Amino acid sequence: MSGEPWFKPHGVLDPERHAALIANRESIARDAGIPVHLLWQKLPALTASERDWLARFHHHRGEGRCGLLLTGEAPALDPLQRIGALAGCLSRNFVRARVVPLLEALEAVADGAPIAATCLLIPDFVPDRATVREAPAWRVAQMTALLTSRWSASGLQTVLHAPSLADAGREYGGFVADLLRNHYLEVAI
């Protein structure tokens, strides 16, 4: 059993505590939208703030926070890898985390189908700075609906990546920028 990649010294899973996760790893990873190895891999070089956010995941709503806004243009660890690692860590700690591309999230809003996730992670929330512009009105309305519905629901968290809070404001307008400023923890990566 110690030769399996998910147990120490290679992975971080406990054979007893994570038995169901290991048995269902393919479907859990598929639901989370991540490669299966992220369920047992050690966290990469995340910031202290990201690690603290993970450790205090279940306390954020009580503190008025409904998410994490990762900002930065050229981080050492690209946003998809970083967000995938966050989702893997949350999943192995029995949180339903799902990495969902922006287009898929907006389609769910348009279809009236809420995304079933305790933690929704959108790595392409705002494109890189070179392409930031005001989004079409329909997209702003759908993003506002998505973030507002997750803000109003108990126990849900959302993780987003943008080059900066200002870029998110340019893309989605003042309401979304205010929601992010007031109810999300911004972490520069």
Image: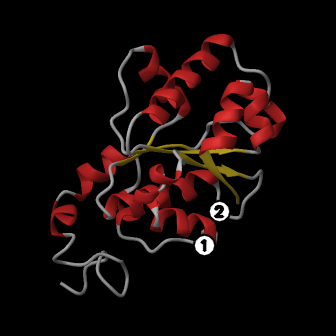
Would you name the residue on which mark 2 appears?
77
Q: Quadrant of residue 171?
A: top right
Residue 136, position in %: x, y?
69, 14
Position of residue 54 relative to residue 65, above or below, is: below
Would you name the residue on which mark 1 appears?
45
User: Marks 2 and 1: CB-CB under 8 Å?
Assistant: yes
Q: Quadrant of residue 74?
A: bottom right
Q: Is residue 153 left or right of residue 64?
A: left
Question: Which residue is painted at 55% across and 57% down in the image?
Answer: 81
Question: Which residue is painted at 37% across and 64% down in the image?
Answer: 37
Q: Quadrant of residue 76?
A: bottom right
Mark 2 or 1 closer to N-term?
1
Q: Secondary structure at mark 1?
A: loop
Q: Amino acid at mark 1?
A: Ala
**Quadrant in the picture for the N terminus:** bottom left
Question: Which residue is painted at 49% across and 35% down in the image?
Answer: 151
Q: Amino acid at mark 2?
A: Leu
The color scheme shown is: secondary structure
How crowded pointer 1 is (Cα within 10 Å; few <14, some 14-19, many 20+) is rated as few
Position of residue 89 relative to residue 105, above or below, is: below
